[in-house]
């Protein structure tokens, strides 16, 4: 600053004479002048008691600061206004103070008391801004005051003030690093904070002050994972980067079995998932016992909670998640990041630049990941050169036997580009492809040789250099090329290329015995005009020729060495002297002379053309150090995985008693908790591998913090948002929430039953068509199995309930088999209809066409919404459609004809009574009120004995919800279960109460206007409970 | 993290500096100027430059370099993304992010930068929060302020700052409640000389302009959400609803914002709405050549293709061009060698054509480079992927909003490769 300051003062002084009239024009005067006289003006304005004048003065001063001009002499005048009432003046004074306090420490102290007063203000904004400015004033004397203020603010009521405290920590630390221990205490306290507002800032402070104190994270690990999605984007980046490092120290490498047989590795992988479904503690215990790798549930929690952030709009967040997956995820799962990274390539060119650097590193280690996106790296003529070269790097890394021909064709078009740097890079890329993939080496070489006749010298030169490297691999076959290149020495001027040609001729002079001496002759002639690297190669060539063909080249060599002896460059003089001693036998020359030939003409290993991005991954990806390929200041080394996992129990947190029943929300969670984990465990085998780990941390997060946990944050957020909505709205929402569990099950099921079909684009297409009719119903896209799994609040009981019924057996259907089940989703086109998911599988050898429904034979009042005709179903293919049937609240079957292009089949769908209703959400009071209205005839009561297998809460709930499409109603009493639903057609309420009595006795009560339904439902539920 | 920020214009003047920690001398920018000189082209200035004591991370936006000074390890994208957010904020506040706009509003710029970073770490970057803290300049307000002496700076904590919906400000009121969605799709394609598609994909965004009172809770559903292959969301979108139901459910920010951006799954074939027939040929021993280009509609779903502009970077040897356009007008810049043909609308009855003579520098060898044609176009009322908004529902507020959806398809990076230069 000092230089520019001096410069400015000088300028200010000189300009004072030239432009006094500016003083009348505040707008221009503020920016362009820093005149002492005018400073007097400003002082006057600041001293006045009019706020508008003060504001005007401050604006002009700030404009000066912005231009980088010195306004430090106004310090006393400005500081006086620190207590000004006008908030804008005050803010500008703060700006000034922070800028100049360091230079005028004594005067700055005058302002401190104002801030100290501000720290006690009832307004949180004022408290926060006082702390912010106080901590930004870099005056060592006030360190104790700052420390005190930070400590106090860290326990402030307002999370915003606590956030400011977190920001202040690194400021104080950079001012006085002796405060570290005290600051760590504050950090520890703030790390325990449960608000999302603070999380990002405190982790930032942690990273700057004590990144080595990884032990502070243990207790907060799960909370941070669970809060992550709600933290603001900048905080997310910092937290993810920190957690990457944390995970590297605390968990085992998920890829440690990589070296074992593929089969084994796979087994271990699946094994880990089964394990995941179990309880946290057994997990930990088994970790020690079982040899095959088992992923720590906390490790899984981190992976799962970061994955949704790949869809962030913020490129830095996406990159942070991508590097986390790259460094932490099992090999099989890393692939998910490719798509997101490719998406970033559409962003600003600076973003592209950084992303491509990282992709280049990743693509060396995990080529397969980016292969599907090969074309996204194709180069456009409008790309900036630095982007082009990076894309080229990626393309080269991705090249393999199968795609090399496409890539080379692409490269051919690049060579004709007008951007010469890019062409040169392309030629090198071709060379690398040729060395890496033996199959195409000759093709590439031929292509490069053709380039030797290119009109552009740079192209030729670059080709020569690359050909030289390629020839070294199999020189004997290519003496023709060497001859061709020898001719080029007449024309080509680029030193590197000339040097390469000379080296080649020297090295393989035996293959071109006639040409080599002639080349040397020409070079000797032009020796003095050559560049240094060329001269060195001329000497080299001379030496080699002397050794192999001394008869023809002895004199030439002597001549060249003599020229070199008097060269200006000492390297060349040295080389000449050294070589003369070595090759020309004299009396003094030692034993080395004998070995000269061996020294010069030894077999040299062919160069390996490697990517400059190789091994860059020892730097944490996405970091500045990785980009620069050099350790940046403050870079935290990414530790290697430990051999033995540290004790995972350090992350366990006891749940404080009071958090358990603070709100209805929590209570609900608590009730639901048991059946999450357990039912997940049961249904484990049918689930996809990806979705399973869910349950573990589900139970875990609940048990851990008891705060805004993974599932909690989602549901709570929704809850809070809907806070000001009407009660009815809330109900609707609840209902939706319940309902949305159901389809997920359905889609998982269907995915499970026809594995592989999900990748079939035709199938997807068909779903696409269908959703034209009813967008709400389509099964979740199979493209996103991983996403499906990461929804936490799954009501899994429904899982076992989805029972598939047969509509047409494959024998009677002559190869066409049809099954149906009740998806329990609202049928969007008509809310009075029950959605029936129908699945067609074609087991014949030929296509089945025009599958449709005709001539429904229905009882009066019943209606059917047919599905859209399936135009064709290829052999072996499976497809599913949704149709809606209004059963009029009766269990009568809907009959119809199922037609194909050749045949007609008779079909009937008969609903179980439990499917004729849809769940509704109601509170305990509403339930009681409604129940009170439905007594007498509408109430059916039955006694039953619960079997041993059906005693626990969750089994009961699960069995009831599987027997009927109902939702649970919260209930105060421990031994009572309540459920509610509405019939689909008439919307009559169906209320179910199950009361557990002593022993295994229980009483089931169903209240409903529809007595028939009530009676049948009682029967069904009892059957479900006692089976 | 971010130590200082310098704003530099194209002629190399540092016209604004801001320091969040202790002051870093302007001379650090010399390293940047050095790199800039080396790069020749502004696009090729490396975004990250390492100097002995600092690292410089820069972006180039609207003819301004935003150069930030970093002292310690930080993810480069973090800084780049932040700088772009700063530029976006300026754009939002002043209508343009130009040197004059920044100089004219230097105090507001300074106040904004002060709020956006604390000690180099981002503090408030949501435009809705910033607007509550610092009111954007309007002519009316500046007049009022100068009379009443009231200020542009809010004195309460923005409600958004504390809630978990930081993007929305409280107490929004409109007399006309409106919600507009623009579905904008861009086709990126590379077409080879035979007319077949080398690479094509559709990138789309939904930009929204929401002017709704209170705290509306919107849900937007699509006829065919399956088309969306890879989506990135504004933070307001409830991710879980999307996962489970494919419905965009959100409490919107107030004003203009980008709701989602998406890519259409690559399995779907991309319809290419135009085709180009071209012929550029040079005779062996003559200093002229022939040029003939026709553009026609193809797979345009019955909509009119308009706003068609073709640009060609001609080889260096081309001196000038004598062409006749059947429609629209063309310009050829003999310095940059760029041929631009502003075609306008394509009418299938009479296809636009541009043909004529290319004159080469005498004595220059015939060009061997293949110029590629870049084409821009626009199709109104069509999302080329077939994406359709099904419905928009609003909860949480009583009034009936006016809703509107607009579809536009544009050419993104649309390139017809290597028009053949016939030799002989």
Image: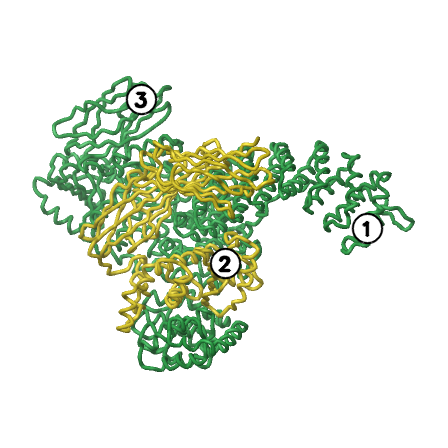
Chain colours: A green, B yellow
Q: Quadrant of the C terminus of chain A?
A: top left
> Label 2: chain?
B
Subunit ID for the residue under disc 1: A
Of badges 2 and 3, the one in the foreground is 2
Q: Secondary structure at mark 2?
A: strand
Q: CA distance from mark 2 to mark 3?
A: 61 Å
Q: Residue under label 1, please give it.
A: A563
Q: Are marks 2 and 3 on the same chain?
A: no
Circle 1 packing at 10 Å, graded few (<14), some (14-19), many (20+), is some
Of residues A486 and A442, the one drawn nearer to the viewer in this rendering: A486
Q: Residue furthest left?
A: A936
| Whether labels 2 and 1 share one chain | no
Left or right side of A625 for A112: left
**Residue at image coords 15%, 30%:** A862
User: Residues at marks 3 and 1, common chain?
Assistant: yes
Question: Which residue is tagged 3?
Answer: A849
Residue at numbered disc 2:
B57
Instruction: Please state the horizontal and vertical placement of residue A901, each as a whole percent of the image.
Output: 28, 19
**A802 lies above or below B403:** above
């Amino acid at each position: 600053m000092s230089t520019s300051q001096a410069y400015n003062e000088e300028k200010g002084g000189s300009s004072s004479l030239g432009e006094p009239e500016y003083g009348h024009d505040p707008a221009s005067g503020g920016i362009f002048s820093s005149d002492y006289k005018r400073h007097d003006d400003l002082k006057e304005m600041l001293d006045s008691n009019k706020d508008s004048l003060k504001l005007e003065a401050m604006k002009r001063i700030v404009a000066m600061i912005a231009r980088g001009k010195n306004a430090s002499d106004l310090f006393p005048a400005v500081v006086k206004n620190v207590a000004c009432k006008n908030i804008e003046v005050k803010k500008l004074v703060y700006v000034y103070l922070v800028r100049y306090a360091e230079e005028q420490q004594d005067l700055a102290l005058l302002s401190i008391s104002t801030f100290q007063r501000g720290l006690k203000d009832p307004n949180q904004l004022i408290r926060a801004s006082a702390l912010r400015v106080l901590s930004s004033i870099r005056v060592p004397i006030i360190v104790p005051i700052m420390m005190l203020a930070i400590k106090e603010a860290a326990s402030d009521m307002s999370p915003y003030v606590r956030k400011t405290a977190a920001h202040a920590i690194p400021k104080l630390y950079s001012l006085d690093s002796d405060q570290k221990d005290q600051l760590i205490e504050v950090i520890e306290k703030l790390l325990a904070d449960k608000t999302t507002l603070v999380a990002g800032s405190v982790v930032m402070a942690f990273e700057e002050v004590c990144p080595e104190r990884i032990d502070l994270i243990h207790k907060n690990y799960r909370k941070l994972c669970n809060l992550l999605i709600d933290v603001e984007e900048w905080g997310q980046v910092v937290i993810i980067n920190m957690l990457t490092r944390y995970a590297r120290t605390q968990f085992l490498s998920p890829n440690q079995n990589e070296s074992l047989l593929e089969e084994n590795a796979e087994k271990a992988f699946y094994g880990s998932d089964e394990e995941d479904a179990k309880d946290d503690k057994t997990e930990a215990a088994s970790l020690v016992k079982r040899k095959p790798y088992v992923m720590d549930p906390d490790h899984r929690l981190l992976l799962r909670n970061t994955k949704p952030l790949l869809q962030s709009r913020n490129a830095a967040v996406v990159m942070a998640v991508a590097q986390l997956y790259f460094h932490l995820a099992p090999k099989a799962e890393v692939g998910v990041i490719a798509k997101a990274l490719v998406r970033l390539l559409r962003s600003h060119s600076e973003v592209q630049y950084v992303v491509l650097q990282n992709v280049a590193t990743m693509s060396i280690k995990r080529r397969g990941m980016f292969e599907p996106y090969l074309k996204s790296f194709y180069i456009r003529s409008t790309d900036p050169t630095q982007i082009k070269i990076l894309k080229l790097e990626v393309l080269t890394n991705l090249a393999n036997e199968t795609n090399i021909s496409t890539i080379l064709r692409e490269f051919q078009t690049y060579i004709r580009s007008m951007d010469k740097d890019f062409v040169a890079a392309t030629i090198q890329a071709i060379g690398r492809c040729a060395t890496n993939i033996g199959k195409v080496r000759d093709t590439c070489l031929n292509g490069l040789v053709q380039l030797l006749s290119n009109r552009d010298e740079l192209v030729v030169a670059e080709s020569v250099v690359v050909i030289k490297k390629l020839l070294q691999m199999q020189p004997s076959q290519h003496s023709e090329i060497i001859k061709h290149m020898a001719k080029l020495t007449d024309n080509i001027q680029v030193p590197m290329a000339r040097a390469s040609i000379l080296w080649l001729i020297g090295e393989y002079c035996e293959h071109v015995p006639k040409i080599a001496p002639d080349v040397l002759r020409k070079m000797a002639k032009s020796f003095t005009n050559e560049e240094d690297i060329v001269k060195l190669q001329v000497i080299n060539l001379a030496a080699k020729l002397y050794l192999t063909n001394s008869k023809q080249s002895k004199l030439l060599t002597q001549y060249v060495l003599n020229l070199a002896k008097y060269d200006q460059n000492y390297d060349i003089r040295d080389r000449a002297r050294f070589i003369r001693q070595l090759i020309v036998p004299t009396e003094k020359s030692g034993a080395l002379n004998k070995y000269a030939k061996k020294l010069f003409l030894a077999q040299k290993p062919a160069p390996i053309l490697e990517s400059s991005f190789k091994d860059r991954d020892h730097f944490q990806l996405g970091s500045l150090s990785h980009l620069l390929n050099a350790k940046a200041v403050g870079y935290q080394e990414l530790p290697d995985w430990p051999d033995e996992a540290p004790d995972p129990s350090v992350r366990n947190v006891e749940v404080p008693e009071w958090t358990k029943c603070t709100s209805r929300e929590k209570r609900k969670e608590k009730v639901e908790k048991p059946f999450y984990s357990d039912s997940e465990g049961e249904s484990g085998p049918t689930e996809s591998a990806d979705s399973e780990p869910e349950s573990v941390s589900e139970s875990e997060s609940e048990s851990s913090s008891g705060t805004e946990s993974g599932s909690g944050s989602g549901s709570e957020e929704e809850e809070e948002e809907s806070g000001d909505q009407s009660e009815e709205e809330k109900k609707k929402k609840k209902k939706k929430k319940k309902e949305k569990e159901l389809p997920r099950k359905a889609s998982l099921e269907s995915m499970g039953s026809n594995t592989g079909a999900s990748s079939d684009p035709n199938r997807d297409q068909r779903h696409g068509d269908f959703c034209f009719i009813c967008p709400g119903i389509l099964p979740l896209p199979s493209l996103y199995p991983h996403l499906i799994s990461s929804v936490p609040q799954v009501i899994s009981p429904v899982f076992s309930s989805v029972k598939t019924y047969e509509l047409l057996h494959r024998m009677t259907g002559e190869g066409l088999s049809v099954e149906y089940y009740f998806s329990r989703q609202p049928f969007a086109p008509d809310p009075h209809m029950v959605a029936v998911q129908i699945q067609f599988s074609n087991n014949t050898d030929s296509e089945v066409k025009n599958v449709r429904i005709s001539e429904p034979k229905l009882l009066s009042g019943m209606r059917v919404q047919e599905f859209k005709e399936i135009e064709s179903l290829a052999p072996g293919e499976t497809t599913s459609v949704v149709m809606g049937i209004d059963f009029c609240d009766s269990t009568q079957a809907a009959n119809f004809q199922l037609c194909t292009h050749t045949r007609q089949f008779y079909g009937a769908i008969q609903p179980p009574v439990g499917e004729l209703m849809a769940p509704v959400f109601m509170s305990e009071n509403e339930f009681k009120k409604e129940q009170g209205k439905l007594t007498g005839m509408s109430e059916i009561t039955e006694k039953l004995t619960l079997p041993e297998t059906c005693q626990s809460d969750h089994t009961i709930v699960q069995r009831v919800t599987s027997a009927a499409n109902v939702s649970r109603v919260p209930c105060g009493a421990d031994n009572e279960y309540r459920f509610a639903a509405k019939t689909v057609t008439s919307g009559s309420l169906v209320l179910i109460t199950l009361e557990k009595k002593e022993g295994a006795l229980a009483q089931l009560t169903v209240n409903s206007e529809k007595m028939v339904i009530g009676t049948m439902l009682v029967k069904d539920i009892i059957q479900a409970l006692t089976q | 993290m971010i130590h200082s920020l310098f704003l530099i214009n194209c002629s190399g003047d540092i016209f604004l500096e801001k320091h969040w920690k202790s002051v870093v001398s302007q001379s650090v920018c010399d390293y940047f100027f050095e790199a800039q000189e080396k790069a020749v082209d502004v696009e090729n200035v490396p975004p990250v430059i390492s100097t002995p004591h600092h690292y410089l991370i820069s972006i180039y936006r609207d003819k301004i370099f935003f150069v930030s000074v970093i002292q310690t390890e930080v993810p480069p994208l973090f800084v780049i993304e932040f700088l772009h957010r700063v530029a976006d904020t300026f754009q939002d506040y002043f209508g343009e992010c130009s040197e004059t706009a920044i100089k004219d509003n230097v105090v507001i710029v300074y106040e904004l930068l002060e709020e956006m970073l604390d000690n180099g770490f981002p503090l408030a970057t949501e435009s809705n929060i910033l607007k509550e803290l610092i009111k954007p300049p309007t002519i009316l307000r500046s007049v009022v302020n100068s009379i009443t002496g009231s200020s542009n700076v809010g004195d309460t904590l923005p409600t958004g700052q504390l809630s978990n919906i930081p993007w929305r400000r409280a107490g929004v009121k409109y007399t006309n409640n409106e919600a507009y969605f623009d579905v904008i799709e861009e086709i990126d394609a590379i077409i080879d000389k035979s007319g077949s598609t080398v690479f094509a994909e559709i990138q789309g965004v939904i930009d929204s302009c929401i002017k709704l009172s209170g705290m509306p809770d919107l849900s937007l559903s699509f006829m065919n959400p399956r088309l969306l292959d890879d989506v990135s969301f504004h933070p307001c979108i409830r991710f879980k609803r999307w996962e489970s139901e494919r419905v965009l459910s959100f409490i919107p920010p107030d004003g203009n914002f980008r709701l989602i951006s998406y890519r259409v799954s690559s399995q779907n074939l991309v319809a290419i709405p135009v085709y180009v027939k071209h012929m550029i040929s040079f005779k062996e021993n003559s200093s002229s050549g022939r040029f003939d280009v026709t553009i026609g509609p193809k797979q345009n779903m019955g909509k009119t293709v308009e706003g068609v502009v073709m640009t060609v970077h001609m080889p260096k040897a081309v001196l000038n061009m004598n062409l006749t356009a059947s429609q629209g007008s063309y310009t050829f810049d003999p310095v940059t060698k760029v041929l631009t043909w502003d075609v306008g609308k394509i009418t299938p009855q009479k296809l636009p054509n541009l043909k004529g003579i290319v004159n080469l520098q005498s004595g220059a060898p015939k060009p061997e480079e293949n110029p590629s044609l870049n084409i821009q176009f626009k199709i109104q009322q069509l999302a080329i992927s077939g994406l359709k908004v099904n419905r928009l529902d609003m909860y949480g507020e009583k009034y009936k909003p006016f809703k509107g959806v607009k579809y536009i398809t544009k050419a993104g990076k649309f390139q017809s490769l290597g028009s053949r230069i016939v030799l002989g």
